[in-house]
Amino acid sequence: MTETVKENFEDAASATDLFKTAIQDLHAQGQREFSSFFDKYTDLKELYDNYATSKKAENEKMGDILKDFMPSLKERLKHLFINQQSVPPLTLTDILNELLEKYEIMHSNEKDDQPAIEDFLKLESDGVSAHYFFADNTTSTPDITLLGIAFNRGSLPKANFRTTV
């Protein structure tokens, strides 16, 4: 309710004090909601003020507000669409893939110009090294050390692996 509408209600000949108080309370509540809305959507306040103070015909005022508002609305909708399309599928796996694939973020242990995934891919060719301890204490010398175990050894016989005891 605008200030003018509130004053018209209060100035009505038949307006009682109870009615005037109710109108003032209703106006105050509307102003709080109005302020709350424009606190949240500050960019719309200027558009509303231009609309409210314009002396143009109603359809022209609506045309003006849409002309001003549509470009920013289109831009917001584009961002919203992209966010909705890209964010939900992102998982921890996707983030880890980015980390592993981009050397600028996380590089290989051996070569700074290679992505970290190269360290994992190297397991396929060089294999995995392992230390076996037959005790609860792993600070001592390992009981068995296996170097270069093929990552996917398949049916290779055990004799193909170097071992030290």
Image (tube, helix red, strand yellow):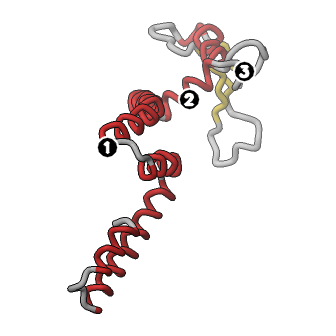
Give residue 103's mark: none
Which comes sooner in the sequence, label 2 or label 1? Answer: 1
State how far apart marks 2 and 3 are (Cα).
Answer: 14 Å
Q: Residues within 10 Å of mark 3 (few under 14, many from 20)?
A: few
Local secondary structure at mark 3: loop
Q: Which residue corresponds to mark 1?
A: 58
Q: Is residue 162 visible?
A: yes
Q: Dividing the picture into quarters, in which one does residue 146 lie?
A: top right
Front of the two marks 2 and 3: 3
- Badge 1 amino acid: Glu
**Badge 3 is on which residue?**
104
The earlier-in-sequence mark between 3 and 1 is: 1
Q: Position of residue 141 (x, y in %)?
A: 76, 36
Residue 165's place in the image compared with 88, above or below, is: above
The amino acid type found where label 2 is placed reads: Leu
Q: Is residue 108 left or right of residue 150?
A: right
Q: Quadrant of the N terminus?
A: bottom left
- Residue 89 visible at all: no
Could you tell me residue 22's position as x and y percent?
Answer: 29, 83
Q: Where is 76 relative to 22, above or below? A: above
* Mark 3 touches mark 1? (CB < 8 Å): no
Mark 2 or mark 3: which comes first in sequence? 2
In percent of the image, x 35 and y 81: which residue is there? 25
Residue where numbered disc 2 is placed:
96
Q: Quadrant of residue 122?
A: top right
What kind of element bears circle 1?
helix
Residue 11, horizontal then vertical, whole percent: 31, 80
The quarter of the picture where the C terminus appears is: top right
Disc 2 element: helix
Camera-side mark, 2 or 1: 1
Image marks 2 and 1: residues in contact by CB distance under 8 Å? no
Q: Residue at x 24, y 85 (%)?
A: 15
